[in-house]
Amino acid sequence: MSPPSLCAAACSTPLRAAPPPLLRFRRPASSSVSVSAARAAAPSVSDDLVLRIAEQLEDSAASSPLLDPLRSASALSLLSTPWPTRRSNEAFRFTDISYLRSLPISLPTQTPGLAPPPSPDAESHIIFSDGLLVSASGAHVAALADMPPGVARDRAAAALAASAQFSHRDIFYDFNAVGASDVAVVYVPEGAKMAGDPVHIMFGYSGSDGASMMMSNPRVLVIAEKGAEVAIVEEHFGTGEGDGGCYWANPVVDIIVEEGARVVHSYVQRQSSAAAHTKWTTVQQNTSSTYEFVEVSTGGRLNRHNLHIQQLGPETVTELSTFHLTSQNKQIHDLHSRLILDHPRGYSRQLHKLIACGSGNGIFDGNIQVNRYAQQTDAGQQTKCLLLSPKAVVNVKPNLQIIADDVKCTHGAAISGDLDPNELFYFQARGVDVKTATDALLFSFGAQVINRILFKPVEQKALAQLKELLTLSRQSN
Amino acid sequence: MAPPFAAAAVSSHPSLFSPSTSRPAIRRHLPPSSISVRPRRCPPAASAAAAEPAGKLLLEVHGLTASVKETGQQILKGVDLTIREGEVHAIMGKNGSGKSTLTKVLVGHPHYEVTGGTIMFKGENLIDMEPEERSLAGLFMSFQAPIEIPGVSNYDFLLMALNARREKDGLPALGPLEFYSVVSQKVEALKMEPKILDRNVNEGFSGGERKRNEILQLSVVGADLALLDEIDSGLDVDALEDVAHAVNGLLTPQNSVLMITHYQRLLDLIKPSYVHIMESGKIVKTGDSSLASHINEGGFKSIASFV
């Protein structure tokens, strides 16, 4: 069967007319050879939907010499990657992503929307609007396209080229690589300490008319050089009227923590209730580096976060805290985290908390690999889930893969339908009724993670939003 | 209900533990010639002597039996106890004799089930009331081992407790800012670090901090009857004095304390009008503070022979 006819049959949606999509994957001459080779070798693997989206993304993104190696690698990978389904792909076994297929994809125009950018809370900031980089200002912050030749630009280019080799990628990582028009770069030179003055990264999404799902692919690269300290705060939110509309946010944040460096990373996701949010965070930690991560995800109809941390040297410190709240019906929150330890004396702590209300679905797959040379690792992992309604579902899969033989690893999973009666009684004994005590305890369940956000304005916003969502879900119950 | 004698700035609830600076710190009680507690095996001579003018009846427990809900194991086997306004009672007894269970049953701990007897508090049947209603009615128990509540700050917790009380009294809720001046005084009075308010309830508190924190809660919300379960355990001498001083400072002629202790030291600091000995789920002996010194010297064995 000839490629054009294959595509013509498959791409009969109004969104896509001829020419056939496969032929469009032709960026560098070399890859076009691989493309046809891949197609010939395994035509059945090529997934029409994946190709259609990839093609749309490719059309929209302008060529950039620094991004092209990553783009072609991802484009190539997309050719042979099927759309993940619960049956075919273990990483999506519990996560129903069919919502992403419910509407055709549209892409933002190259000029950002008219909505005024939100005012940042920090001096150093990066603003994305529908995935397009609108502004990047402050110390050590720049758009890749605007970076002058020099060390910073070379390091960023090298890091992006290395991302092309990222072996744990999935289609969302590749979609972003193909569709990202520019990269916001936070480059903290050797020894620079700016943990007290965070870089505030705001991702606003406006969505589209409702007949399509606007997809955006913002991308951020953070490099903390030897001994540097930096705090970054990510906020993802809808900017449209009312709740914010229907869109698909597909951001990627790559972080490199060099020897003795420290990155404090806060991430707040409060997308609109009709949004889909598929996120990648990759972290590489070199010798004696510290990475502290706090996530608060409350928004979106479908939320998937892939958090991937790779240890590159001994004595790393990794602290991960996440809080997910499914407050609306059929809402899906998924955290897939993977921590790969290959060197001795690593220390890691992970806390994952989840509240599921209504018919919400929470998924946690927390993988920690303690490989042969990761002796004297101290790894702890804990997950606590609260199911507040009979229809709520959680799928929790904490897993430690330990090959080294001299390690200290603990993990615990607690899933409960009720609050601790002793805690409730303590409130009652002080005259506080069960309802008020329940509200306070649920709030504190999330606040325990939110309080770890060191950037006050964002912490306060997240706490206020948590309170509001808990009140709403109580009323709807 | 008693008239609001203490028109406190914060809580107009008729309770001791509102600001109390002008009150006498320590009251001495009449010698307990009037035995208002009637254990079953009470000698007839003692009850006959009950002719002295006494305070208003606060708590009246008759034939109280209670068991652990889950196992059905009976702990209280017929407790009789009467506490009047302005009295300080102490319960002593061996480990496992049911002292703590008694206080927990009084405040409605869900772990226990009342299987018989009556509890009247200020003329109302306590058994029919929810734990929070008992608290709002003026009953306070300091936990022997207060639990941690991660994520809830001590400040917020105290404010919630106070506002629950104010709501019941028909007063507007206090805002976080107004509350600060109220609570900071009390923290100071207990010689606690002000930053204890920012920490989560009991999270990472030392044993002493937990005990002080219980008394801080008492001083903020107030009570007509405070049940203090081993507030002296885990406290060093100085800390014990601070806590005892705070409790004494909070006492008025209208409210009462029931404390559980193993040690004379606390009774030297907070003078009891009555000392009860509990054994196998019953109060087997009641006397004045000399009973406590007797135990201190000869142990509970000496009391057994005494009886």
Image (cartoon, coloured by chain):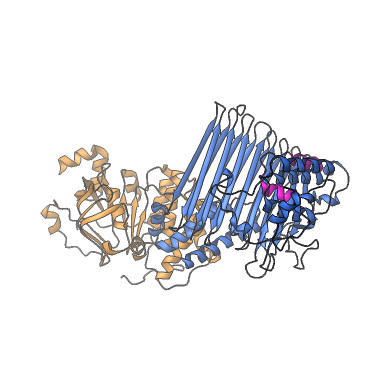
Chain colours: A blue, B orange
- Along the line of sight, which residue is nearer the eye, B298 or A97? A97
The residue at the point 70 percent across, 57 percent down is: A11
Is B166 situated above or below A294?
below
Q: Residue A428: image x %, image y %?
A: 39, 59
Residue A184 in view here = no
Q: Residue A257: image x %, image y %?
A: 71, 40
Point out the residue furthest to the left here.
B44
- Along the line of sight, which residue is nearer the eye, A177 or B292? A177
Residue A259 appears left or right of B233: right
Q: Residue B215: image x %, image y %?
A: 41, 54
The residue at the point 19 percent across, 63 percent down is: B52
Is A346 situated above or below A186?
above
Residue B204 appears left or right of A21: left
- Along the line of sight, which residue is nearer the eye, B172 or B193? B172
Is A313 situated above or below A428?
above
Q: Does residue A163 belong to the magenta stretch?
A: yes
Is A17 situated above or below A334?
below
State the extent of the magenta-drawn residues as a range. A157-183
Point out the residue furthest to the right here.
A149
